[in-house]
Image: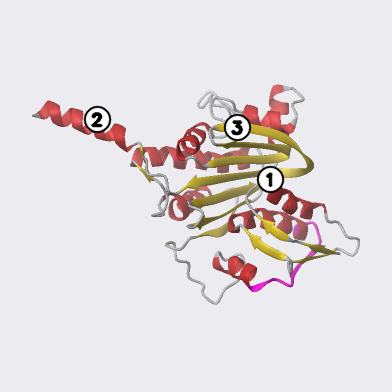
Amino acid sequence: MKHFLTGSIKTNLSGLEKLIELSYLEPEDKLIDIDMNSLKFLDANLISVLAAILFQKYWDGYIVKLSNIRPKIRYIFERNHFFPSDDETFNPNETVMEFKVFSPDSENEFIKYINEQLLDKSQFPKMADGYKKQIRSKIQELFANAVEHGKAKHIYCCGQHFPQKGVMNFTIVNLGTTIQDNVNSYLNDTLDASTAIEWASKEGHSTAASESNPTRGLGLSLLQDFIVQNNGELSILSDKGFWCIKDEKSYSQEIEKIFLGTIINIVVNVNDPKEYGIPFIREIEELFTNKST
C-alpha cells in the first residue's frame, strides 16, 4: 500500500490528524510505503509522532518504507538523528532538539535530555534556578504519567527551535493507555475524551494520587501558568480528544479518528523578555541587603 504525505505538516490539529491517519494503514500484504515526494515541510518536533506510529506498525508485523524523500525533508531527519547521518556528533547549540526514544526505566536520562535539549538552551526564556527546577519537575511528571498512568513501553521526544518564527517546539508522545480511559476508570464515569483531558489538566486532579502525593496530576498547572505568561501554546491530543491553551484561552474538541496514546506539544515564545522567578528573588535579596546595612 502506498500512502502519500502531502503539503506542510505543522504543529496544529490539522498536522497531527495527517500523521494519525498513518496508524490506520493496514494493508493485507503488510507493506506500508509512505511516499514523501509531495511533502513540502514537516515541523521537526513532530518526528516524535511519526516515529511512534511507524515503530508501532513495525512491531505489529508491517514492513514500513519511506520513499521519494525530498532533500529538504531528509535533511530534517538527519539533523536530529532520526535518520543516520555522516555527522554522528550532536551540537546542543544548534536549533535542533535531538530525537530520542526512552524506556520506562530511563527517567534520569530523560531529565538530562530535558536539561540539555530544552531548558538550558540559550534561546529558552530566562529563569531563576528555582523556577526552572519547578518547570523541569513538571515536564518530568509528563514522563512519569506516561509510564504509571499510560503503562507506556516507550516515550518519544523531539523538538525544534524556529528562529524566524521566534518559537521553540517540543513534543512528547506515548502509545499507552489514553487519558480518557484512565480518567473514566478513576471517576467511574463516561466523560468524552476532550472533557477527560480538561479534567486531568486541572491542578490537584490525578488518577494516581496517593497518601504521600495526593495532588499529583499531569503536571500541567505550572506549565499552563508559564505558557500563558510566555504567550506560548500547550496542547494535548489523546484518544478522540484535543485540548489547547493559547492566547490565555483554552478550548477543546472531539476529533474524528482515535489516537491510541497521548501527544503533548509545548510551544515556547523565545522572544519573551521576561525573567521568570527572578524579580521575586531580587526582592528577597534586596530585603536581606537592606536589613544588613
Q: How many marks?
A: 3
Residue span colored magenta: 59-71
Identified at 55% across, 67% down, the residue is 79
Q: Give the numbered dot on residue 284.
A: 2
- Marks 3 and 2, the one that precedes in the sequence: 3
Q: Secondary structure at mark 1?
A: helix
Q: Check disc 2 and give the amino acid type.
A: Ile
Provide the residue designation for mark 1: 13
Residue 84 appears at what percent x and percent y? 60, 71
Instruction: Look at the image and tell me whether residue 209 can be seen.
Output: yes
Q: Give the CA distance from mark 3 to mark 1.
A: 14 Å
Q: Are marks 3 and 2 in contact (CB under 8 Å)?
A: no
Q: Nearer the viewer, residue 28 or 103?
A: 28
Provide the residue designation for mark 3: 250
Q: Are marks 3 and 1 in contact (CB under 8 Å)?
A: no
Q: Is residue 101 magenta?
A: no
Q: Tell me which corner region of the image, top left, top right, bottom left or bottom right, holds residue 72.
A: bottom right
